[in-house]
Image (cartoon, grey):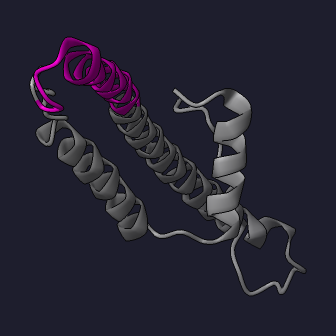
Amino acid sequence: MLPLEDRELLNQTMLGLNIDPETISSLLVSFDMAATGLENDPIAAVHQTSFGESFTGGYRLATNVQMAHDAVGEELNRMIAGLREMGASVQQFSNDVQQTTEQSVATAARIEVATDCVAAPDFSSSQCTLPTDNQD
């Protein structure tokens, strides 16, 4: 998962850029497709005779190439995990934005209801009713 500082930077950047939910969804699909593509295309094994049949040339070279392939494979697995984690982080970001938006809309509605009580009186309206949290 992204460190808190990186998540906050990503959050601020996306908010500043007014990124819409469709774009976030597209990012998630892209991360998943990239990870799936890497998983479905493994590195082929190196045959011991790929570089000839001599021990000093062919076999040792094939062994070294296989070791290099194994190291690349491990890094690709880390990349797959990173893409999946990035997708999870972007999904969490999207959920956080949705929740914040819903809370903001609810707060704005309460403020709008309360504005009648603080507006200049016009004597034509009845008394205002302030919204309260109490459900008596």
Relative height, residue 103 to residue 46 (above, below): below
Quick check: 41 left or right of 23? Answer: left
Relative height, residue 115 to residue 43 (above, below): below
Q: Is residue 71 magenta?
A: yes
Q: Nearer the viewer, residue 38 or 16?
A: 38
Tell me the residue at 65%/71% (across/down). 17
Q: Position of residue 79 (x, y in %)?
A: 40, 34
Tell me the residue at 14%/42% (across/down). 41
Q: Position of residue 8 (x, y in %)?
A: 70, 41
Magenta stretch? 50-78
Q: Nearer the viewer, residue 136 or 99?
A: 99
Quick check: 5 left or right of 54? Answer: right
Quick check: 112 left or right of 87? Answer: right
Counting labels gives 0
Quick check: 67 left or right of 8? Answer: left
Tell me the residue at 28%/14% (across/down). 56
Q: Nearer the viewer, residue 87 or 105?
A: 87
Q: Position of residue 80 (x, y in %)?
A: 33, 34
Tell me the residue at 83%/87% (across/down). 122
Q: What secondary structure is the magenta-colored segment mainly?
A: helix
Residue at the extreme top: 55
